[in-house]
Amino acid sequence: MKKQFTTQILYSKNVSWLTEIYKKCLKLDFDLMDDLSDCTGGDIASIHTTDEFSEGYELLLKAAVCELGGHAGHYHLLLQTAFVSELVEGQISSAEFITEIRKIIIDNDKEGTDTSIISCGEAVRKAKEDITIFKVSMSRHLTEITGSKEPIPFYRCDYILLELDNYIVRFLK
């Protein structure tokens, strides 16, 4: 009889949630860059809006790293790997992605000397604030691009804002 051993790695449900919401944000960011590039004939540098969006959601990934016991140095190294793009392209699952983060932390692989950390709550609140600012900015840009006299609403990140709101209501109030 062949014996088989399995290992179960436990981590907070915040890590899974942060990873999933980060994945949704990153996918939306890629889609927005493509759409803006098509809309402006490839000149998205003149809009700068996706930078505003990514600043809003990047802290979610940093918080996931911190929830696993890591810090900013581990987060910065993670961004230099292919794991982030593999996650959004569906080449690896969220569980596999989290495993790779854990390996970086266990091996203490890091970039730079920054050892700052951020809590899940701080990251979620900051992401909500920054993504809301981005939403208003996109509405303004769309209104300018189209030449409309009425503001053009931007709804593409509403489902992400709703998830962030729900998290805040359930766990942070």
Image (spheres, rainbow, N blue to C red):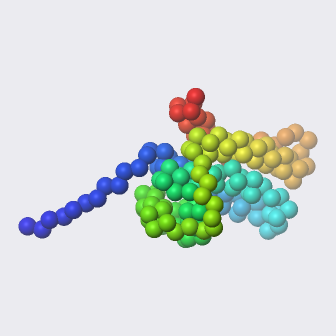
- On screen, 5 above or below 167? below
Task: Report the label total.
Answer: 0
User: Considering depth in this image, is 113 or 15 the residue closer to the camera?
Assistant: 113
Query: In the image shown, does 70 or 2 lie closer to the viewer?
Result: 70
The reply to whether residue 24 is in sight is no
5 with respect to 31 (left or right): left
Tell whether 68 sits left or right of 59.
Answer: left
> What residue appears at the point 44 percent right and 44 percent down from the top-left corner?
13
Q: Nearer the viewer, residue 158 or 94?
A: 94
Residue 43 vs residue 170: left or right?
right
Residue 39: x percent and y percent? 79, 61
Q: Position of residue 85 (x, y in %)?
A: 57, 66
Question: Where residue 92 sits: x, y (%)?
Answer: 46, 64
Q: Residue furthest top?
A: 173
Q: Quadrant of the C terminus?
A: top right
Residue 133 shows in the view: yes
Q: Position of residue 78 (x, y in %)?
A: 56, 65
Identify which residue is drawn at 59% across, 54% down: 62
Q: Quadrant of the N terminus?
A: bottom left
Q: Quadrant of residue 133?
A: top right
Q: Is residue 145 above or below residue 85?
A: above
- Residue at 57 percent across and 45 percent down: it is 119
Q: Residue at x 62, y 45 (%)?
A: 123
